[in-house]
């Protein structure tokens, strides 16, 4: 397209900056930053509006070429748990509205449901379209907590309201698109735009994987029950010698006090596989990438629908995936090509799939090549940015082509 856009990314619950206590921004934040950077490379101007959670942070901060972070006051400038942000939505939305009154963007892209409410409030009296990405849906959360959980019920109601009010709702895959339609959001208001993967960070090893007679398995993510780590531990009982490393949960020095970590270790002790389970706690994104290049398989076994970013990161690293057939994992993992899919809560079937794949070196190598090719051809951040750009153009009624010369315009489901 011939003109650049002013894009406002609203991230109330996912600051794009690393926490003041050290470490990295969380996964959702990393995806927002990656999309913002990729859009800036397409010659657009992107501002990420985040809540001021550190009094020493400047109000306006350059993050990368073409990308700025603008901190908005809402409550005390201190970290607040995601579940406690709801009372701050109105203040954050009012602050956004004041900023948009003097410096209006062309389009607002809200991330997560609370950002959507704030964005709709800020644009209520202005002709600025709001695009919404939920990242995860409350209906999926309800699958992993009590069905009558009041927080989940409130979130589900608000997501339906946001979806019907937004100019466009972005789904990460067809599974989420179907769930949005079940929520009453018309198909014509939904665009399927898969997120990208950092293929510079997640890539195959430059050398051959160090030979080992011990099957090496890796899982990445929270240690909560809904992520299915318990099923992976039960599968170990049918995989003699296999070692499972789990990266996630609190930092390593806090694992001993973590309820979920204790639950998993006690399970491994009861089953006699504690010596083959290694919990390493929270690790950086770079360390996750390095870990992936040292294992034979990555396991992604959530019980409730998830998009499957970890699965794509593994595939980009040339590591086949064994995953549960739920949510977006059914779209991202091609069964029989880049990995295997099994039912959730089925440790025996999980073990059988792992054993079959590890016992067939030719198939394992074919999966490695196919996995890398799939991610690089369909899930790079440049491709995600061009797809998002096309979607913004549709919302704004702009008919020109992409800003990146020669870039292929991916099909964006309407």
Image (cartoon, rainbow, N blue to C red):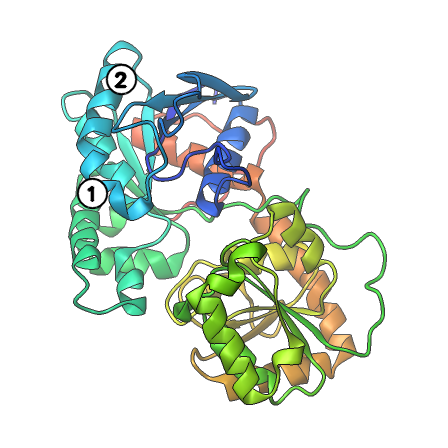
Q: Is residue 186 left or right of residue 28?
A: left
Q: Is residue 15 above or below residue 180?
A: above
Per the image, label 1 sits on a secondary structure element best described as helix
Q: Is residue 287 left or right of residue 362?
A: left
Q: Is residue 216 above or below residue 351?
A: above
Residue 219, by quadrant, is bottom right
Label pair 2/1, CB-CB below 8 angstroms:
no
Question: x, y percentage for residue 85?
Answer: 26, 40
Question: x, y percentage for residue 164?
Answer: 18, 44
Identify the residue shown where x is 35% and y is 53%. Answer: 136
Tell me if residue 135 can be seen.
yes
Q: Residues within 10 Å of mark 1 (few under 14, many from 20)?
A: many
Residue 100's disc is 2
Front residue of 6/78: it is: 78
Identify the residue shown where x is 21% and y is 35%. Answer: 89
> Tag 1 or tag 2, which sits nearer the N-term?
2
Residue 245's disc is none
Tell me if residue 397 can be seen.
no
Residue 162's disc is 1
């Amino acid at each position: 397209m011939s003109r650049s856009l002013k894009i406002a990314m609203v991230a109330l619950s996912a600051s794009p900056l690393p926490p003041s206590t050290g470490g990295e921004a969380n996964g959702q934040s990393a995806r927002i930053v990656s999309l913002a950077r990729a859009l800036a490379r397409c010659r657009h101007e992107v501002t990420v509006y985040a809540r001021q959670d550190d009094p020493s942070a400047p109000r306006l901060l350059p993050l990368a070429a073409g990308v700025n972070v603008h901190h908005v006051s809402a409550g005390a400038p201190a970290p607040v748990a995601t579940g406690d942000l709801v009372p701050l939505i109105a203040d954050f939305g009012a602050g956004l509205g004041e900023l948009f009154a003097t410096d209006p963007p062309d389009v607002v892209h809200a991330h997560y449901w609370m950002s959507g409410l704030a964005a709709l409030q800020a644009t209520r009296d202005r002709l600025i379209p709001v695009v919404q990405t939920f990242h995860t849906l409350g209906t999926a959360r309800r699958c992993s907590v009590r069905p009558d959980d009041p927080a989940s019920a409130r979130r589900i109601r608000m997501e339906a309201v946001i979806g019907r009010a937004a100019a466009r709702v972005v789904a990460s895959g067809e599974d989420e698109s179907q769930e949005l339609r079940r929520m009453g959001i018309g198909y014509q208001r939904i665009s399927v735009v898969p997120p990208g993967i950092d293929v510079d960070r997640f890539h195959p090893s430059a050398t051959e994987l160090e030979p080992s007679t011990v099957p090496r398995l890796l899982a990445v993510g929270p240690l909560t029950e809904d992520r299915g780590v318990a099923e992976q531990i039960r599968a170990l009982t049918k995989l003699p010698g296999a070692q499972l490393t789990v990266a996630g949960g609190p930092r390593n020095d806090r694992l001993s006090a973590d309820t979920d970590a204790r639950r998993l270790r006690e399970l491994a002790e009861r089953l006699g596989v504690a010596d083959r389970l290694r919990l390493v706690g929270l690790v950086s994104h770079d360390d996750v990438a390095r870990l992936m290049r040292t294992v034979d398989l990555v396991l992604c076994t959530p019980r409730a629908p998830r998009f499957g970013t970890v699965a794509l990161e593994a595939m980009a690293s040339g590591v086949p995936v064994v995953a549960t057939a739920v949510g977006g994992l059914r779209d991202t993992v091609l069964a029989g090509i880049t990995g295997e899919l099994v039912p959730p809560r089925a440790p025996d079937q999980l073990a059988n799939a792992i054993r079959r794949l590890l016992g067939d070196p030719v198939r394992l190598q074919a999966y490695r090549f196919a996995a890398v090719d799939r991610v690089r051809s369909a899930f790079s951040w440049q491709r995600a940015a061009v797809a998002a750009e096309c979607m913004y153009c549709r919302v704004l009624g702009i008919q020109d082509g992409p800003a990146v010369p020669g870039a292929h315009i991916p099909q964006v489901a309407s």
